[in-house]
Image (cartoon, rainbow, N blue to C red):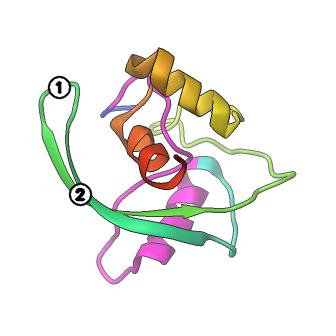
Amino acid sequence: MKSWPNCWDHSAAGHVDGGEDYLTAAERELKEELGVETDNLEKLGKYYSEDRRQDGLVLKRFNVVYRTKCEDQDFTLQESEVSQVKWVSLDEVKKMISQTPEIVTDGIKAVVEKYYK
């Protein structure tokens, strides 16, 4: 919400804390931001990015992307980080990126470009 206010992003994201590995951080962030617990995250890949936020700050990040299936789970949103959640298909995400790119983050654009062409 702070970095990309009023924009759609991927399900959950965050930083790796000291002593954590990427998978542990991903599981923690998914639980913190959405209240979803899972032990079946599938790693899609890792990439480096440099993105300029809307406020001009340049973010230099190592990104690891995971996916999972989470059916029949209720969401408990971390209100300081997540304002809204909705299910959309991959085709709907691609349509948002192509038709209304101002409402999606650079992060979701990169994930779709790298892993869902």
**Residue ID at (70%, 68%):** 38
1 and 2 marks in contact (CB < 8 Å): no
Amino acid on which disc 1 is placed: Asp
Magenta-tinted stretch: 4-33
Crowding around mark 1 (Cα neighbors within 10 Å: few <14, some 14 to 19, many 20+) is few
| Image quarter of the N terminus | top left
Q: Secondary structure at mark 1?
A: loop
Q: Which residue is mark 1?
A: 55
**Residue ID at (57%, 24%):** 95
Q: Secondary structure at mark 2?
A: strand
Of the residues tagged 1 and 2, which is closer to the observer? 2
Q: How far across and down, in percent of the image, does residue 14 sit?
A: 39, 56
Q: Is residue 27 magenta?
A: yes
Q: Which residue is mark 2?
A: 61
Left or right, 89 with reference to 31: right
> Farthest residue toward the front?
117
Q: Compared to 15, does 42 lie above or below? A: below
Kindly report the distance in space between the C-alpha atoms of the residues bearing marks 1 and 2. Answer: 17 Å
Where, by quadrant of the figure, is residue 21 drawn? bottom left
- Taking depth in this image into account, of 62 and 81 the one nearest to the observer is 62
Q: Is residue 75 magenta?
A: no
Q: How far across and down, in percent of the image, does residue 20 sit?
A: 38, 80
Q: Compared to 31, does 81 lie above or below? A: above
Amino acid on which disc 2 is placed: Arg
Q: How far across and down, in percent of the image, does residue 40 sit?
A: 69, 74
Left or right, 88 with reference to 67: right
